[in-house]
Image (cartoon, rainbow, N blue to C red):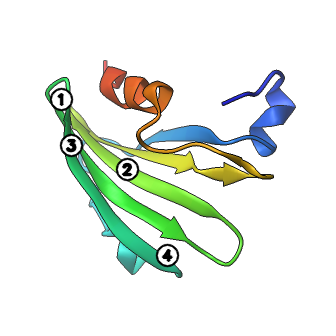
Amino acid sequence: KGAETEDDAYTTPGVTIRFYGVDWDFMAPEDNFEGEFKAWGPMNLNGKIASGLIGLTDSEKFAIVYVDVDGGELEVMVQLEQFEQTISLDDDDVLAILASLEIK
């Protein structure tokens, strides 16, 4: 959010989306990350169920959201803070991205 060039992806809050495939063995994020986490969701976004964790490590604050869509599950990492700029999971742009996800 607020990025004007590709390089701004490293200095502004943003969203990274990953699809691991239909047969992906889900591993609970709390088993894979060090730091403090709190649960977020579940939330219904246009028929898609999203849930995840908001985490804080020594160096960053981010959210890992899992969205169930037809054909699999997507992992969405939202970088909530970058260089004193912030975004939240309640931001209209973030919610619009989560609601628009689909697998073709």
User: For this view, does 29 lie left or right of residue 78?
Assistant: left
Distance from disc 2 to disc 4, alpha carbons, whole Å, reads 14 Å
What residue did someone put label 1 on?
Answer: 70
Q: What residue sits 43% from the left and 43% below the top?
A: 89
Distance from disc 1 to disc 4, alpha carbons, whole Å, reads 27 Å
Q: Visible in this render: residue 27? A: yes
* Circle 1: residue type: Asp
| Sequence-wise first label, 3 or 4 | 4
Distance from disc 2 to disc 3, alpha carbons, whole Å, reads 10 Å
* Circle 4: residue type: Phe
Distance from disc 3 to disc 4, alpha carbons, whole Å, reads 22 Å
What residue did someone put label 2 on?
Answer: 65
Q: Residue furthest left?
A: 47
Residue 83, horizontal then vertical, whole percent = 80, 52
Mark 3 lies on a secondary structure that is strand
Figure quadrant of the N terminus:
top right
Residue 19, horizontal then vertical, whole percent = 40, 40
Can you say whether 14 is above or below 77 in the image?
above
